[in-house]
Amino acid sequence: RAYICYAISKSDFGHYDEAIELYKKAIELEPDQPKAHILLGNMFSNQRKFKEAEEAYKHALRITQLDPDLYILIANTYYMNNEVERSIYSYKAAVGLSPENDEFKLVYIQVVEDFIEESGEGVGVQTNESSQNNEEESNTEKKKKTKIITKTRIKTTYTPLDEILDSKAELNHD
């Protein structure tokens, strides 16, 4: 714990490399302490070292698998590293773990919408009606339809993840 406090102080004063070493020392002494892994990931993320941040967060995830905030940190890291598709899955996991959290839902929906707008891709959703009228519709109209369909799907897609997590929890109790 002392290493974590000292690392936080070092990072507050801009001594990031020293803070990273102190977080690593804390992890060495208590490898099953997720806080040190998370703070190390935050430090790497702030330095735009996204692969290192991802690794630190994944170590924390192995310790505390059902923390929706951790999935948000991982999703943010993917997003900042331009791995938008991977970020979508992590945001979706966070929503699945915390379906009552409207902020998570809004971020998830916004990232999916941005992905649709930028890539011109949907999420594998197309209606028969829209496929018949493909030539007649403008790209803008197609995107609007895809967004509406996607939003509807997003509102319901996190439920199966809850079921998976429930069944995983039951398996761990046996």
Image (cartoon, helix red, strand yellow):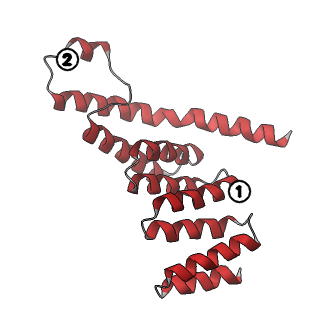
Name the side, left or right, on which 47 lies relative to 149.
right
Instruction: Reply above or below: 118 against 58.
Output: above
What's the amino acid at mark 1?
Answer: Ile
Q: CA distance from mark 2 to mark 1?
A: 48 Å
Residue 59 lies, with reference to residue 155, above or below; the image says: below
Question: Whole-percent x and y of residue 37?
Answer: 63, 66
| Residue 146 at x, y percent in the picture | 30, 29
- Image mark count: 2
**Which quadrant would residue 19 be assigned to in this image?**
bottom right
Residue reaching furthest to the right: 174
Residue 18, numbered label = none
Q: Residue at 46%, 64% (x, y): give it.
A: 49
Residue 111 placement (x, y as % from top left) = 37, 46
Residue denoted by label 2: 134
In this view of the protein, which residue sits in the foreground, 46 or 162? 46
User: How far across and down, in percent of the image, does residue 136 sit?
Assistant: 13, 17
State which quadrant residue 118 falls in.
Answer: top left
Q: Quadrant of the C terminus?
A: top right
Q: Residues within 10 Å of mark 1 (few under 14, many from 20)?
A: some
- Frontmost residue, 54 versus 110: 54
Q: Is residue 160 left or right of residue 30?
A: left
Horizontal relation, residue 3 to residue 127: left or right: right
Residue type indicated by callout 2: Asn
**Residue drawn at the location 51% of the way across and 46% of the way down:** 90
Q: Which residue is mark 1?
A: 63
Q: Residue at x 48, y 47 (%)?
A: 91
